[in-house]
Image (cartoon, rainbow, N blue to C red):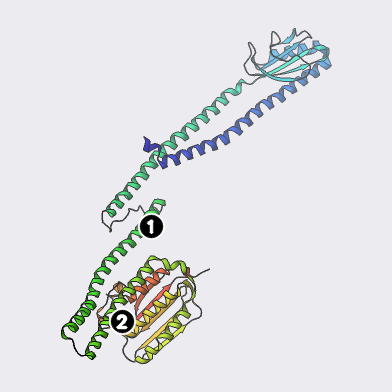
Amino acid sequence: MVRLIRSSALTWALSYVLLGLAALAAFAVPLWYAWNVTIYSGREAILLDDAQRLTDVFNREGVAGLTAHINERVGMQIAGERTLLLTDDAYRPLAGNLAAWPQGIPSKSGTHAVMADLAGQPPHTLLVQTTLRGGYHLLVGRDLSRFLPLERRFTWGLFASVTFLFVVGVAGAILIRRELLARVQGIRQSVSAIMQGDLRHRLPTARSGDELDTLSQTLNGMLEHIEYLIHGISNVSNSIAHDLRTPLAELRSRLEELTLTRPSPAETFAEIEAAVADVDRVMRIFSALLRLAEIDSGARRSGFVRVDAAAVAAEVVEFYEPAAEQKGVVFSFQAAGEAAVAGDPVLLAQAVSNLIDNSLKSVPDRGAISVRVGRRADGAVEIAVADNGPGIDDADKPKAAERFFRGDASRGTPGVGLGLSIVDAVAKLHGGVLQLLDNHPGLLAQMVLPLTSAPP
């Protein structure tokens, strides 16, 4: 019972019931007031006209003429339809259908409209009293009880409407509560399964597009991202253990060999340089992981500014031109006007740098690399790096941006398998995507930043 009282569905439904009752009252009260004003005011005007006509008869024909006129009207009308009474100055009846002057009727001169219950007459009679010349008194009345059945019907109809609205509202509240509890119970069971470790479980959706369905779809998207991150952490942990073991084992072997053999200074310094290279490799792995962690956290998004992606790419291309020239690679850059986005210039430069660096590692001598920046037809900014190297197999493209992934074509090249992972993370941070396509031959890597990332 307490849970039912505290139910949000019941509270909302009862609130709507009260709102409906208030609207019904706002409609019924003015209608009731207008009805009463119309009935009483209209009847009073009719009685005043009757009194005026009888007064005219009195003025023309005197007391005898008015007495005969009233008696004639009383004889012709339906019993109880109208109340008529003419009295002298002492309120003794002269003509009409009342035996005596009723109690509670003002006796002072003038015209008065009052309600009275008359003995032998219908209740709720509206009376108009007029004082004539010579002290005579004229009383004209009309029955209003004929409207009572209509008023009762209106009252009962209003009561029935209130009852129906209340019953339907409460019943609707109970049904809505049952439906909400069923939906919430499904969400609770799914969350419990997820809390127990089943990350593949998803909240049920009814495809109805209502608020709970939208919430479930949003939470499912969050759960997919969490599952992706947890699997990523698991894969990264395994990859870190694997990729760090090799340089650390080589480092230990070099140092152990130096300790045991104690070679000449030249050989010792050569081994030390190789050991420093192994340490640098480990530091590069940790630096890349720290950069990925910083990007995944979204902390850099707060520092977004208006950035010209074409200018950023031009600076990176200029930095890599000497390396490309040394390898004999044809290096070209093309920018179709300004490509402004809201983003982090350092991260964008890092992403373009990684794409170019991967191309330089994979292209053969005298190969070709082209960098293009421009806007698509839909307004999105595209940063594309194309080369004529070995490319990436179609089976490996979906996994190429995973951390520490290295395809068969790249196993002989230096690197730790985090370059494309950083590019993919930077693209997602800016609301975009990384696309890996065939360049026939080679690879076409393009980072697409949607128009929504551009500042107003």
Residue placed at 49% from the left, 32% from the top? Answer: 162
164 or 323: nearer the viewer: 323
Task: Name the amino acid, label 2.
Answer: Gly
Residue placed at 42% from the left, 66% from the top? Answer: 299
63 or 204: nearer the viewer: 204
Q: Residue furthest left?
A: 260
Quadrant for residue 247, please give it: bottom left
Q: Can residue 155 be seen in this view?
A: yes
Residue 422: percent from left, percent from top? 35, 73
Q: Quadrant of the N terminus?
A: top left
Count how many numbered circles sit on residues in the image: 2
Task: Name the amino acid, label 1.
Answer: Thr
Q: Is residue 164 left or right of residue 49?
A: left
Residue placed at 60% from the left, 21% from the top? Answer: 146
Quadrant for residue 381, please give it: bottom left
Q: Is residue 24 left or right of residue 179?
A: right
Disc number placed over residue 374 in the picture, else none: none
410 or 86: nearer the viewer: 410
Sequence-wise first label, 2 or 1: 1
Residue 100: percent from left, percent from top? 70, 8
Residue that carries the numbered disc 2 in the rendered image: 391
Residue that carries the numbered disc 1 in the rendered image: 218
> Considering only vertical position in the picture, is 271 above or below 92?
below
Residue 295: percent from left, percent from top? 38, 69
> Considering only vertical position in the picture, is 76 above or below 362?
above
Q: What element carries label 1?
A: helix
Residue 300: percent from left, percent from top? 43, 68
